[in-house]
């Protein structure tokens, strides 16, 4: 689908359309404009094929035979997959506890929202394997009746499952990852900046930190090629000196990791653009520290900026700086005062953490989208609605802006920095606006927009949270269950060991 170049007028448009209260719109939903006929319809052209010319969603989605699968008068079923085994030392409890806390909070505090429906979450571990991801996504749709699918992390797995979902007309959402392999899918939607769209933000941060000799370390997978290219082109335009450009195997052994560290140190690299799994980051940072070498590690979100990385990787990761679609726990009370109390009420004694925050934001975004679609919820109507609504603003994620021509909805990010004294990431900057990469991809950005209890100006948010939802995608710190399901927060299913995601 053609890329959208977001322009400065977007701030004015958002500001004008965010008179939601007086227009009868839900908080956090700006300017829903759906034609009467579209409200009931939407599936992509049969089989989810893109429209002519590559504009995957330029033609309104039409309902197919399974348009309302996963929706009853009482509940909505959503399926989530993530690699809780295979790539990371991240414990899984956080995912299992956090995946439905927002929905339990919503059912308790606003039972009439979502037109009286509850949300049941079905989860599967994709084991960091694209083939497994397709298998579990098919299982969630065909056996569990999932209305839509969500990728929790891992670019290769997200791409594989999104392509499966597109083939059967099922909506699929994830955090922004790659664009190649996803841009022409009619039913795929990214709720945050893609890796390529974050390139200008990363280059700007490198310049602000005064880093002069830059190394590039990217996992060797086709899913990361567009981000790799976007960073190199943006860095060249900015006049940065790239002195090392190295690929690492997806499951790099210690010897390969240490060889890259030696190359970076030998080239006197002071800043490393990194796009890799948490395990790889921890291995690189640990190897560097053992050689008395401490460059700045910087890259796109999500997983290298999780607190599980600082828990396992400090003090070696103390120079970690990463962008993220959601902020860290240190600022969430001012952005959404409901999050921590909801965890205290529904978190089974577990403390609120950043994985739970990512899931809360994801589900909050979905709630906004469901509300905007209306009581007659179907897959086609859902997709038509999110493509014609000006913005979905949760006051956690930067506003999500999706159009028929551009399903990459991110407009900004938060900047996180590792604090090894606290063994946690902190939020260095909030709502940093996205920009245009050298390859033409745009991160956009908004200056304005309304949130419940607060306003945004230049992306800096004041005030409290909103009703509705955001995503985060991101990796998993959590989840027990390789096939668990939750209904109103009650988890059924088994446990798995391991954890993690790439990117």
Image (cartoon, rainbow, N blue to C red):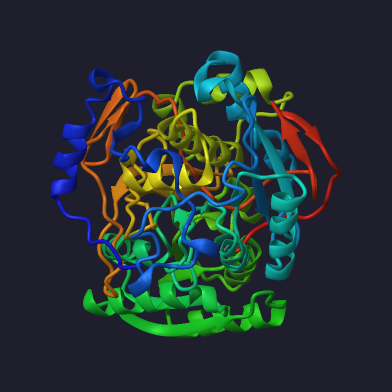
Q: How many marks?
A: 0
Residue 438 x %, y %: 26, 74
Side of 122 relative to 43 (left or right): right
Q: Is residue 158 above or below residue 468?
A: below
Q: Is residue 42 above or below residue 288?
A: above
Which of the image's four quarters has the C terminus?
A: bottom right
Q: Is residue 269 above or below residue 327?
A: below
The extreme right residue here reads 494
- In the rendered image, is residue 326 in sight? no
Q: Write the residue at 45% across / 84% down.
A: 245
Q: Write the residue at 29% across / 75% down.
A: 439
Residue 423 x %, y %: 59, 44
Residue 92 x %, y %: 74, 45
Side of 257 relative to 223 (left or right): right
Q: Write the residue at 63% across / 56% down.
A: 313
Quarter location, residue 122: top right
Query: Relative to the observer, which residue lies in front, 357 or 150?
Result: 150
Quarter location, residue 360: top right
Q: Write the residue at 64% across / 75% down.
A: 250
Residue 451 x %, y %: 32, 28
Which of the image's four quarters has the N terminus?
A: bottom left
Query: Relative to the observer, which residue lies in front, 268 or 56?
Result: 56
């Amino acid at each position: 689908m053609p890329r959208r170049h977001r322009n400065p007028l977007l701030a004015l448009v958002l500001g004008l359309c965010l008179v939601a209260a007086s227009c009868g719109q839900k908080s956090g939903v700006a300017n829903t404009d759906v034609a009467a006929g579209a409200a009931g319809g939407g599936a992509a052209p049969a089989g989810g094929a893109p429209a002519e010319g590559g504009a995957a969603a330029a033609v309104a989605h039409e309902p197919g035979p399974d348009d309302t699968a996963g929706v009853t008068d009482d509940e909505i079923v959503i399926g989530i997959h993530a690699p809780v085994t295979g790539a990371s030392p991240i414990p899984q409890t956080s995912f299992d506890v956090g995946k439905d806390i927002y929905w339990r909070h919503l059912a308790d505090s606003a039972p009439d929202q979502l037109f009286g429906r509850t949300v049941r979450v079905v989860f599967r571990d994709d084991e960091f394997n694209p083939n497994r991801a397709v298998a579990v996504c098919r299982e969630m749709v065909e056996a569990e009746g999932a209305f839509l699918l969500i990728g929790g992390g891992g670019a290769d797995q997200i791409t594989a499952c999104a392509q499966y979902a597109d083939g059967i007309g099922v909506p699929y959402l994830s955090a922004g990852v790659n664009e190649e392999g996803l841009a022409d899918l009619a039913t795929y939607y990214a709720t945050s900046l893609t890796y390529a769209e974050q390139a200008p933000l990363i280059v700007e941060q490198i310049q602000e930190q005064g880093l002069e000799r830059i190394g590039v370390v990217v996992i060797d997978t086709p899913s990361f090629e567009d981000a790799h290219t976007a960073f190199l082109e943006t860095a060249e335009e900015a006049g940065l000196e790239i002195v090392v450009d190295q690929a690492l195997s997806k499951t790099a052994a210690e010897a390969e990791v240490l060889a890259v560290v030696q190359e970076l140190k030998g080239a006197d690299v002071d800043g490393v653009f990194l796009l890799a799994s948490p395990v790889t980051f921890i291995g690189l940072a640990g190897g560097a520290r053992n050689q008395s070498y401490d460059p700045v590690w910087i890259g796109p979100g999500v997983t290298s900026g999780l607190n599980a990385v600082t828990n396992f990787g400090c003090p070696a990761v103390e120079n970690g700086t990463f962008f993220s679609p959601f902020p860290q726990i240190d600022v969430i009370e001012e952005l959404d005062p409901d999050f921590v109390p909801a965890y205290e009420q529904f978190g089974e004694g577990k403390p609120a953490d950043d994985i739970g925050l990512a899931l809360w934001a994801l589900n909050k975004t979905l709630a906004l989208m469901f509300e905007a679609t209306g009581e007659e919820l179907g897959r086609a109507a859902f997709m038509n609605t999110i493509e014609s609504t000006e913005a979905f603003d949760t006051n956690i994620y930067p506003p999500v802006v999706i159009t028929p021509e551009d399903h990459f909805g991110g407009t900004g990010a938060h900047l996180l920095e590792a604090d090894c004294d606290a063994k946690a990431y902190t939020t260095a900057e909030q709502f940093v606006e996205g920009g245009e990469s050298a390859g033409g991809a745009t991160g956009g950005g908004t200056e304005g927009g309304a949130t419940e209890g607060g306003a945004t100006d230049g992306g800096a948010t004041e005030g409290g949270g909103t009703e509705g939802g955001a995503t985060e995608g991101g990796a998993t710190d959590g989840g027990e269950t390789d096939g668990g399901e939750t209904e109103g927060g009650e988890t059924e299913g088994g446990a798995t060991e391991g954890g993690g995601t790439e990117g």
